Amino acid sequence: QVQFVESGGGSVHAGESLTLSCAASIDIFSLNAVEWYRQVSGNPREFVAGVMWGGSTNYADIAKGRFTISRDKPANTVFLRLADLKPEDTAVYYCNVRWYEGDTMHEWWGQGTQVTVSS
């Protein structure tokens, strides 16, 4: 059974950094895509960053230059490093994973991890 674990988050001051993790029980290089989203209460969930099967990455404008998504094969983990955090980055961050089993695509959402940035 394929399993994923989302972790990280916490409370920091503006300018500090945090790293979020999304660990897989299977080879992360076999995953179709791993993406991070965030959501502020009352607002729609928004895309933050993603890494595709081939290694290409993409970032939302709010993440460019400050956030970095990466894959660690030995750990089977995708990391999202949040640097130079701002109070407006405060949100619940979610990991989203898509992978194929045969011709069937599966999708998983993490339970969300809170990131709180104080000024």
Image (spheres, grey):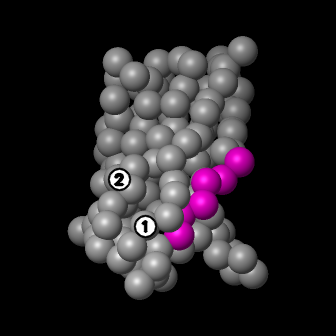
Q: Which residue is drawn at 66% across and 53% down?
A: 112
- The residue to which callout 1 is attached is 12
Which amino acid type is shown beneath numbered disc 2? Arg
**Viewer-proximal residue among 65 and 5:** 5
For residue 78, say whether it is visible. yes
113 with respect to 78 (left or right): right
**Residue 110 percent coordinates (x, y):** 66, 45
Q: What stretch is highlighted in magenta?
A: 111-116
Closer to the chain start, of discs 1 and 2, is: 1
Q: Quadrant of the N terminus?
A: top right
Q: Is the magenta stretch mostly helix, strand or loop?
A: strand
Q: In this view, does 102 lie above or below 119?
A: above
- Percent across and percent down for residue 82 are 36, 60
Residue that label 2 marks: 81
- The residue closer to the viewer here, 98 or 4, is 4
Secondary element at image label 2: strand
**Is 115 one of the magenta-colored residues?**
yes
Kind of residue indicated by mark 1? Val
Q: How crowded is mark 1: few (under 14 residues within 10 Å), some or many (20 or more)?
A: some
* Quarter occupied by the C terminus: bottom left
Residue at image position (47%, 74%) is 117
Query: Does residue 35 appear in this view?
Result: no
Q: In this view, does 40 lie to the left or right of 33?
A: right
Q: Residue at x 50, y 64 (%)?
A: 11
Corner quadrant of residue 109: top right
* Residue 112 vs residue 71, the one in the foreground: 112
Check disc 2: other Cα within 10 Å, few if <14, some if 14-19, many if 20+.
some
